[in-house]
Image (cartoon, rainbow, N blue to C red):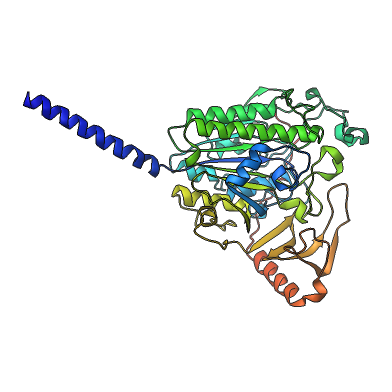
């Protein structure tokens, strides 16, 4: 009898210890990371960033519960180099992913993100993370460049832009009539593939269902890996042209087809957040939402809006590289409107700091750890400069509120021709975010200082093989 009592007491004690230790184990678990990357979404295209007729309730709620960053930048103003910057924490000029000859990778490109580059996924995998890319990769479609060769366990999506592989003889958005608000493309006009890891599983991709299926795949991966830390990189192909929306969203937005697309992306974000809450993962998951570059202005209502910012995609004006950005992590992030500067290159060191991973010490990183700003232990951010590269030239530099333009050029197809400025143009971005008033003549000392910042930065670069200029006649089969 005494033995039975002692055994029962021991079992109860062990049970109590288990109850005590489980929460501690969960508290010590490494955080999950979800990055949602839109394509060609402008600074002014979300409700929380001022759009008057696009409804984005899920992202707007995240902006209130988390941090809405008003000075967050990408590493380049077009697809491929911008994505290389996010993945590596490095300016794309450092790894051959930026070119004056070929601005992005194409289906007949033979280059891609070099194996020597270290990605966020590779660093997190060393910490036991499950990793996935869902959506647009655009860092090389050949097997040696796909996500599965760069630290990701799995990949499902379109390997490049959704306007590529257009049928021969089909002018698509090149026609003026195709830029009308009522124009709608068909999936048969663009023979883009969907890959699962390295295998083509659908061609042409049903782009009408692509946005919702990307959300489905993200939710599926999160559910399958709920018991280990995970990193999900969900890169939408939209609202890059051609625009497609699911039947439940088509015709629903006051903004037309472009608004339909953005509202469907927002709905998918809402479903992912709801899944994190249902699985009890929301308080251990950092979600970041932003875009690869600004709006593609030549396409009129099929393109987005940079709001009060100047110009759009392809330019080094603010509208080309400053993006609407939201960080969300309930119970961890201090809610606020964050006016300090950040960039997508800061995600790699930030995630490493939060996951307990070391950052590479054998190369120059262009990112900073933003976690003190996110978690409320700092008011001043670590970043004081932003470098604006276009093709293979440094066009502009921002330091604090000041931005100097050494070279200016408008958006592809519209805007001003390239001009090299003997006296750089100077703008005070906190007082003049629209870059309307050149004050160089009033502040020659600031101009001189920023010229020095630019020269010191360029001195840190070393020659690399240009990956975007490797071409062949063979496309993905």
Q: Position of residue 80 (x, y in %)?
A: 70, 44
Kindly indicate the quadrant of the structure image that contains residue 40. Answer: top right
Give the quarter of the figure containing the C terminus.
top right
Farthest-out residue, bottom = 445
Q: Is residue 29 left or right of residue 463?
A: left
Q: Is residue 272 left or right of residue 254?
A: left
The structure residue drawn at horizontal position 62% and vertical position 41%, both measured from the top left corner, is 61
Q: Position of residue 466 (x, y in %)?
A: 69, 50
The structure residue drawn at horizontal position 87% and vertical position 46%, both measured from the top left corner, is 413
Position above or below: 436 against 215: below
Q: Is residue 107 visible?
A: no
Kindly indicate the quadrant of the structure image that contains residue 107. Answer: top right
Q: Is residue 278 visible?
A: yes
Q: Judge by depth and name the residue closer to the eye, 415 or 137.
A: 415
Farthest-out residue, left = 2
Q: Is residue 462 left or right of residue 245?
A: left
Position above or below: 448 against 256: below
Q: Is residue 150 left or right of residue 41?
A: left
Q: Judge by depth and name the residue closer to the eye, 348 or 103.
A: 348
Q: Judge by depth and name the residue closer to the eye, 344 or 158.
A: 344
Position above or below: 23 against 392: above
Position above or below: 473 against 126: above
Q: Position of residue 318 (x, y in %)?
A: 75, 55
Give the quarter of the figure containing the N terminus.
top left
Q: Position of residue 341 (x, y in %)?
A: 64, 58
């Amino acid at each position: 009898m005494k033995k039975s009592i002692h055994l029962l007491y021991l079992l109860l004690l062990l049970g109590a210890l288990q109850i005590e230790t489980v929460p501690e184990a969960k508290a010590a678990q490494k955080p999950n990371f979800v990055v949602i990357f839109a394509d060609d979404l402008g600074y002014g295209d979300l409700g929380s960033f001022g759009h008057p007729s696009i409804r984005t309730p899920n992202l707007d709620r995240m902006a209130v519960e988390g941090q809405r960053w008003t000075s967050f930048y990408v590493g380049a103003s077009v697809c491929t180099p911008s994505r290389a910057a996010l993945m590596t924490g490095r300016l794309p000029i450092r790894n051959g992913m930026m070119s004056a000859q070929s601005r992005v990778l194409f289906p007949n490109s033979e280059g891609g993100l070099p194996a020597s580059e270290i990605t966020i996924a590779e660093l997190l995998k060393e910490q036991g993370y499950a990793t996935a890319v869902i959506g647009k990769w655009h860092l090389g479609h050949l097997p040696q460049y796909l996500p599965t060769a760069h630290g990701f366990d799995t990949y499902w999506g379109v390997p490049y832009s959704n306007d590529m592989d257009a049928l021969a003889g089909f002018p698509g958005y090149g026609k003026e009539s195709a830029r009308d608000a009522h124009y709608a493309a068909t999936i048969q006009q663009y023979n883009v593939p969907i890959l699962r890891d390295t295998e083509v599983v659908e061609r042409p991709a049903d782009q009408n269902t692509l946005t919702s299926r990307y959300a489905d795949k993200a939710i599926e991966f999160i559910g399958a890996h709920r018991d280990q830390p995970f990193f999900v990189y969900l890169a939408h192909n939209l609202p890059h042209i051609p625009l497609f929306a699911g039947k439940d969203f088509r015709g629903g937005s006051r903004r037309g087809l472009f608004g339909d697309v953005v509202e469907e992306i927002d709905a998918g974000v809402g479903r992912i957040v709801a899944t994190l809450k249902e699985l009890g993962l929301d308080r251990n998951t950092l979600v970041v939402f932003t875009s690869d570059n600004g709006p593609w202005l030549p396409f009129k209502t099929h393109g987005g809006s940079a709001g009060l910012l100047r110009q759009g995609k392809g330019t080094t004006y603010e509208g080309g590289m400053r993006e609407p950005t939201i960080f969300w992590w309930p119970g961890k992030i201090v809610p606020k409107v964050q006016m300090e500067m950040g960039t997508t290159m800061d995600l790699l060191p930030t995630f490493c700091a939060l996951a307990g991973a070391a950052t590479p010490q054998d190369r120059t990183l262009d990112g900073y750890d933003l976690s003190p700003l996110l978690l409320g232990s700092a008011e001043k951010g670590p970043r004081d400069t932003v470098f604006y590269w276009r093709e293979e030239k440094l066009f502009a530099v921002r330091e604090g509120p000041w931005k100097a333009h050494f070279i200016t050029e408008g958006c592809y197809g519209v805007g001003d021709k390239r001009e090299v400025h003997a006296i750089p143009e100077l703008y005070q971005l906190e007082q003049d975010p629209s870059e309307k008033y050149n004050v160089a003549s009033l502040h020659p000392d600031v101009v001189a200082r920023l010229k020095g910042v630019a020269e010191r930065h360029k001195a840190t670069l070393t020659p690399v093989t240009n990956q975007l200029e490797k071409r062949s006649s063979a496309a993905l089969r």
